[in-house]
Image (cartoon, rainbow, N blue to C red):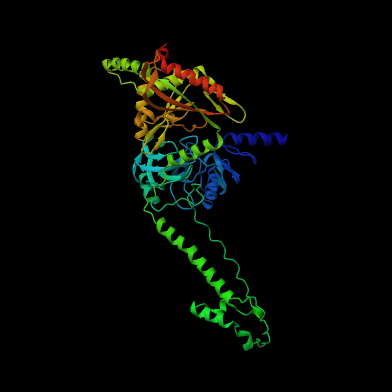
Amino acid sequence: MAYASHVNNHSRRLRNVPKFRWFSNGAQSSVCKREDVAKIYPVGAPAEREIVSKFVARNPVSFGLCKNILSRKTMRLGIPMGGVVYSREFLCSQVLSSRGFASDAGLPPHQEIGMPSLSPTMTEGNIARWLKKEGDKVTPGEVLCEVETDKATVEMECMEEGYLAKIIKGDGSKEIKVGEIIAITVEEEEDVAKFKDYSPPASGSGAPAAKDSAAPPPPPREPVEQPVPSPEPKTPKPTSSPSEDRIFASPLARKLAEEHKVPLSSIKGTGPDGHIVKADIEDYLASRRKEVSASTPKTKDAKLASLDYVDIPHSQIRKITASRLLFSKQTIPHYYLTVDTCVDKLMDLRSQLNSLQEASGGKRISVNDLVIKAAALALRKAPQCNSSWTDDYIRQYNNVNINVAVQTDNGLYVPVIRDADKKGLSSISEEVKKLAQKAKENSLKPEDYEGGTFTVSNLGGPFGIKQFCAIINPPQSGILAVGSAEKRVIPGSGPDQFNFASYMSVTLSCDHRVIDGAIGAEWLKAFKGYIENPESMLL
């Protein structure tokens, strides 16, 4: 009976205690991992609250909790939320934007902004330029800086309201790892000055560098007397006799050595009893001539190697393009199929369509727009070419998304035309022109170039290249290289008759793991049919 009364009294006490989150020894919170939870106090009575506050005052902690988990004002006052008092050893999983509260370093509440991952393949990025300065107020949605990724230059937006207190990585900073701290923001404007000399810790965890407690000096080592080595008895060094220092040489050898200024001490004699003879001097002179003749070309090569040159630093997109193309050639078994297509009917249709476009105020249609449409429809007829290789299976895509290679001053970009098989020629033309302009302005977003299933590269129209072989863009399995159209003489119906026609060479690069030779030929046959009979593309 007494035990039941004790339980009831204890239950009535717990009803008056504010709610708090309980951590078991093996549990972790939804936002953080920690090595230890020191104690859990119900913050109820004033006396208990005072005990907890004193504990926190004696053991300052550094929190990295994410947004909206704790009350900022409560933490600033040093009052533990929900009665939970954490120990000093408190670790948070690395996030791109983490919050740091007052710590041993005496820093006010702040938020550490890390380098974001703006594309699936991004591991590091460069800061192109900051659009905000230290001390500026920032609001959600405002652009903080421009980040150069492995694909394009992307604007990085602010997620919370506050003030930009410190820029860790300035304009032009390169090779910043994803998650590495690039800036600090604070809530109050008066806190900006406190981060003037702030520098992140070398570990890159983003937590302010706390002042290390003075470690006790190591105990002084007692001097250990080294045993004095006993002096060794001096023994007189044997002196060489005059006969041992004398060099024996024949008179003819001595005369030859004097004429060519050859020191006899550098020659080993091969005569009787080690005497130096004439042959020894001649061998020495011959070997010295060979050394002189061997060193002469090196001097000439050194003079020729002094070239005038300029080292151009790699841009981020240049490095990524180089690594992807190298990966493609090393891992993908390429083979190439080339066919000539007559484009006379295609040119006539293009002229008719452009007349209609000009009358309606639309943009002109290019030969490349017709090629993109024909390639997309050919992929519908040969869907095996619209696939990717994996170690476990071949993934065949239902969407036909065509990447178009665009060369700019910054490098090679491949913006994507999604569902090109379902779009009209005018829509494809407008989209290609819009994306090409964004590529030249270096303002493509990830959705503008990701998700392609096939690529078209055209060097014929802009550059007049007759024929070339393109490198496959992983993880795709095919890329079409389009050459220029040229007039050719073709046989006529009679023996002495001939005609003129325009032909365009195209080369399909295939991944032999996915596209067999017959499948690639089938795709080229379908593509040629659409180019030589372009009206069929409109059906």
Quarter where residue 387 is shown = top right
Would you place residue 539 above or below residue 515 in this image? above
Count the labels in the image.
Answer: 0
Give percent across and percent down for residue 380.
49, 17
Quadrant of the snapshot with the N terminus: top right
Give percent across and percent down for residue 46.
53, 44
Q: Residue at x 34, y 44 (%)?
A: 133
Q: Nearer the viewer, residue 462 or 152?
A: 462
Instruction: Kindly tell me whether residue 491 is visible in this rendering.
Output: yes
Give percent across and percent down for residue 525.
49, 19
Spot the residue most to the top. Answer: 539
Q: Residue at x 29, y 14 (%)?
A: 356
Q: Nearer the viewer, residue 315 or 217?
A: 315
Quadrant of the snapshot with the C terminus: top left
Would you place residue 149 above or below residue 481 in this image? below
Spot the residue most to the front. Answer: 496
Give percent across and percent down for residue 440.
35, 34
Spot the residue most to the right. Answer: 1
Would you place residue 376 above or below residue 73 in this image? above
Instruction: Kindly tell me whether residue 141 is visible in this rendering.
Output: no
Q: Nearer the viewer, residue 303 or 487?
A: 487
